[in-house]
Image (cartoon, helix red, strand yellow):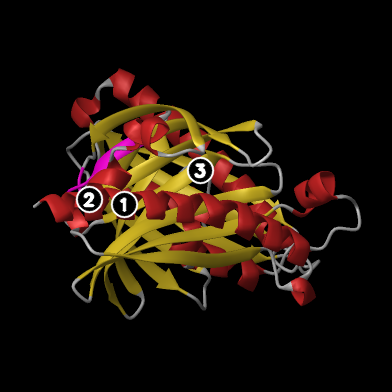
Amino acid sequence: MPNPATAVAEAAGTEAAGAARTHVTEHTVVVDAPAATVYGLVADVSAWPQVFGPTIHVEVLEEHADEQLLRIWATANDQVRSWTSHRILDSRARTVSFRQVASAHPVASMGGKWLVESNDDGGSRVVLLHDYTAVDDDPAAVELIERAVDRNSRAELAALRNAAEQSGDAEEDGGLRFTFSDSVDIGGSAEDVFAFLDRADLWPERLPHVARIGLEEAPSDGGGSTVQRMDMDTRSPDGSLHNTMSVRVCFPDRSVIVYKQLRVPVAMSGHTGRWEIEPHGKGVRATSWHTVTLDPEGVRQLLGPEATLAEARAKVRQALGANSTTTLRHAKRFAENLHDRS
């Protein structure tokens, strides 16, 4: 069987003949979980922000049979990048081929393939291939891309192994991942509600549970969005403070903000969310969505060795829902006050 990295290099080299030099990498991991389970995690992009640490947000722009066009926001060398990628999924061979359609500078081109193979012991082996070129073949850019690909590939494979090996953990107790939402109806405009949620730098003045926030904002590489980095201290009901680090992608034209916590509490391995504002009656309905993946060891560490996932879900649901609902109620007051003055 030919070396898969060599095959990718030959294909990429043909495509980029006469252009910048193509660089090829290969990363592998052995997973103690069936190949079908592992492949399912790779194929399901809706779960990527929960599974893969670097992935902030993914949107499916087009989908036909086994082909997808995706818009991806992810961290690379501590910066948030966004690009469009085309994928071809082959569930029988358990492969996913990908090629960036519009890359973020300094990447000139990038593609590769996921290969999931069954092992004799019932587990699996995952191979992640990349091929890439740098703008103007700049050596500094090549080094920067190489570091990002290596760091993200290692992080993604480790996270994939962890998610696959825990996928069957306590399924009788409802599983590790769950999603919930809270909504508030508001007699005001979507623009005013979005403005309240978007201006997180003002939250310490506007929200009782936010003690401090550091906010950095920059235009996204694409998608008509802006990217925010948030470093926030939140007050618990007992008065204690806890710190969270998040990245948000804000879409003002859609009145939507998506986010991912980069630093999560001990009981969680992943937390993503979405603020969504939609027309409703004579006003709007603002909804806060949360998706959480629990960490079984963290749950036992926090709640005791006999704690169940159901107990952990209830506590996380209560804590996150309380803060979200408080934020939505203050956004309601803000937007309705502006509406009454107009």
- Residue 10 appears in view: no
Q: Which residue is mark 1?
A: 333
Q: Is residue 272 left or right of residue 106?
A: right
Q: Is residue 278 left or right of residue 76?
A: left
Q: Residue furthest front?
A: 341
Q: Which residue is mark 2?
A: 337
The local crowd at label 2, few if under 14, some if 14 to 19, many if 20 or more residues have their Cα within 10 Å, is some
Q: Name the amino acid, label 1.
A: Arg
Q: Name the amino acid, label 3.
A: Gln
Q: Which residue is mark 3?
A: 261
- Secondary structure beneath disc 3? strand
**C-alpha gap between disc 2 and disc 1:** 6 Å
Which one is closest to the eye, mark 3 or mark 2? Answer: 2
Badge 2 vs badge 1, beta-carbon distance below 8 Å: yes
Residue 81 position, x and y percent, is 32, 39
Q: Is residue 142 left or right of residue 207?
A: left
Which segment is the magenta one?
222-228
Foreground pick, 315 / 59: 315
- Secondary structure beneath disc 1? helix
First-in-chain label (3 vs 2): 3
